[in-house]
Image: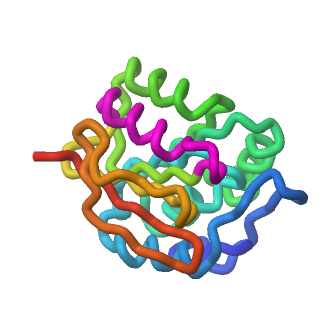
Amino acid sequence: MRVIAGELKGRKVKSIKGDDIRPTSDRVKESLFNILGTKISDSVFLDLFAGTGNIGIEALSRGAQFCYFVDKSVKSVRCIKDNLSILNLLGVSKLFHKDALEAIEMLDKNNTKFDIIFLDPPYYQNLAEKTLIKISSCKILKEGGIVIAEHHKNDELKEKYGSLIKAREKKYGKTILSFYKEEL
């Protein structure tokens, strides 16, 4: 895997061997960041179920101010830490070895808020829905912020979770990106 654009364009990102993670394809990643456009600049980004850290690293490369990475897998946390170290991103990131739902509660208690939240949980476990509900109830999204859930086409997501309303949906084969914003 490589960083697609920004100041780290072309730099390699370590991956994890095996079926433990399912990295976001370059096509979906490029489309995601094209949709986000200038919203990335100076944003505070949260990469939940971060895997290799690929999405958060891309956000930092494209001008995000700071990125929080969350994953409960020891392999993923090691991989993310190595990637952040190799790419000299330790000073603009924070890594949590935690369950995503627990991390959301912890971030809320610390009054940490995000411009952009990206989640790519394992498919077929209803985790995208549970995470969207938790994000809505914990109020960690800044005013005007956006939540993006990457999910399988068979994992249908509702139009609304608490105060979060689906604003957009993009399909890429079997993968869907669902974009949520706070209801005004």
Question: Which of the colour schemes (rainbow, by chain, secondary structure, one colour) is used?
Answer: rainbow
Question: In which quadrant of the rendered view does residue 58 lie?
Answer: bottom right
The residue depicted at 51 percent of the width and 75 percent of the height is 6
Q: Is residue 13 left or right of residue 69?
A: right
Number of marks drawn: 0
Whether residue 57 is visible: yes
Whether residue 92 is visible: no
**Relative height, residue 41 to residue 74 (above, below):** below
Measured as percent of width and height from the top left, residue 78 is found at 80, 43
Magenta stretch: give its range: 121-140
Direction left: furthest residue: 184
Measured as percent of width and height from the top left, residue 32 is found at 45, 71
The residue depicted at 37 percent of the width and 63 percent of the height is 40
Q: Is residue 12 left or right of residue 160?
A: right
Question: In which quadrant of the rendered view does residue 173 lie?
Answer: bottom right
Q: Is residue 27 left or right of residue 167?
A: right
**Relative height, residue 6 to residue 109 (above, below):** below
The residue depicted at 74 percent of the width and 72 percent of the height is 1
Measured as percent of width and height from the top left, residue 138 is found at 34, 27
Q: Is residue 163 left or right of residue 6?
A: left
| Most common secondary structure along the magenta stretch | helix
**Relative height, residue 42 to residue 27 (above, below):** above
The residue depicted at 32 percent of the width and 49 percent of the height is 115
Does the segment drawn in magenta span residue 137? Answer: yes
Direction top: furthest residue: 109
131 and 174: which is toward the camera: 174
Does the segment drawn in magenta span residue 159? Answer: no
Measured as percent of width and height from the top left, residue 62 is found at 47, 69
**Relative height, residue 9 to residue 70 (above, below):** below
Direction right: furthest residue: 17
